[in-house]
Amino acid sequence: MVARNRTRNTLNQIIGTYTSNIGPTTFQRSMTIGEQEVCDDHVGNRTGANLLQLSRSFKYYPTLSGSDGNGRSYNQCPIGYQPGPPDPRQKFPAYTNAQKNELAWKILAETNPSIPHVSIPQVIGEMKDLPGLVKGYGRWCVKPMIGDITKMMDFTNAVNQRLAELRHLRDGKALKRRVQLGVTELNNAVTNTILHSEGSILNGTRHETFTAKVWGSAEWILDPNSYIPELDSRGLESLARRLALGLTSHEALATAWELTPWSWFVDWFSNVGDMIAATNNSIPCTFRRLCLMRHSVGVNTVKLNPATSSSWPIINGWYSVNHVRKERHPVFPVLPVPVPTLPIIDSGKWSILAALATLRALR
């Protein structure tokens, strides 16, 4: 396996002119537009998980043409305001090792083929709270339970899907799974900007936006010593039903944790729940090619304000200024203990914490 860095530039220089009405004076202006790309990847190791870092920036600006009829004119003159592409790294820094470790546990937890479609033990354990929840706190408190009941209504499809996965694993094929880990959008304040001031005035606004989409993937393969290949069709169907309903010994452990008072609070600041789900080995499997991916974009949006701008310039094209980053990180859960995390606590989360604390106190 060999690391490789590739750089590609498709930059072009544009030269235009502005002719002044003060004598036969002509001014030249220039700008550089186009695309730049830097890619760090690997050659070889096609069956493994490889690090990938792709950075691609785009810069396209408008030009000006036209004449005011009094000696001033533009001939493909580059516009004066030429903002650079906003790097999404400003808002989404590189992952730390601790973050990679925590997200590795989350990816394993949510892609694990042993996790149930709906946990019947947990639903039964929470049934005793239902009358008090409805009476004292209203429907919103039982929304998670309603979600579980909704999942139970789709039980047949869940069992069929689980059965197909079991047959896939039994045949020696890898089970490829992907999980969404969130989408974030951040915005900077809108600022007033002078777009051009040479010979005419063009005013507008600039607005920077940053978005990031994060997901993970993993491949699961059957353990060589697994009992799954020995099961006949009836045995596979029975196992598929038990897996879909969470009727396994490991799910009993997960339920015991979830029903423990204040376990919700520990999960809020750590990843104990993810670790329990990730280590569920009801289907004897091992994972490989565990990857964390992120696609982040920074965009400069520029708008013209016609009311405060000169009317005679003809604007050719418009701004297209953005920076895209694509990342793939091979990850592996290396810490045997939960990693404490402190999410951003806003008023909404504090209200949720207070409500959950009240509910647990009722037990």
Image (tube, grey):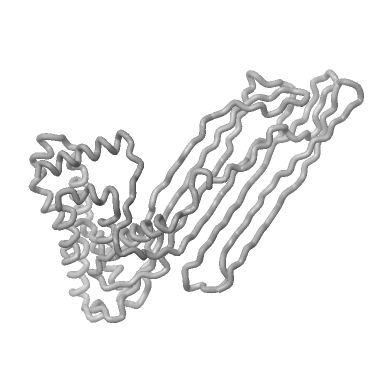
Percent position of residue 173, x then y: 37, 74
Total marks drawn? 0
Left or right: residue 217 versus residue 211 is: left
Q: Quadrant of residue 221?
A: bottom left
Residue in the image at 62% along x and 48% along y: 57
Q: Quadrant of residue 190?
A: top right
Viewer-side residue, 300 vs 234: 300
Residue in the image at 71% along x and 52% along y: 10
Percent position of residue 8, x then y: 67, 57
Task: Name the image quarter holding the N terminus.
Answer: bottom right
219 lies above or below 307 = below
Left or right: residue 84 versus residue 21 is: left
83 lies above or below 233 = above
Left or right: residue 146 versus residue 224 is: left
Percent position of residue 3, x then y: 58, 68
Q: Quadrant of residue 53?
A: bottom right
Task: Name the image quarter holding the C terminus.
Answer: top left
Residue in the image at 12% along x and 42% along y: 361
Residue in the image at 75% along x and 23% along y: 200
Percent position of residue 246, x then y: 19, 61
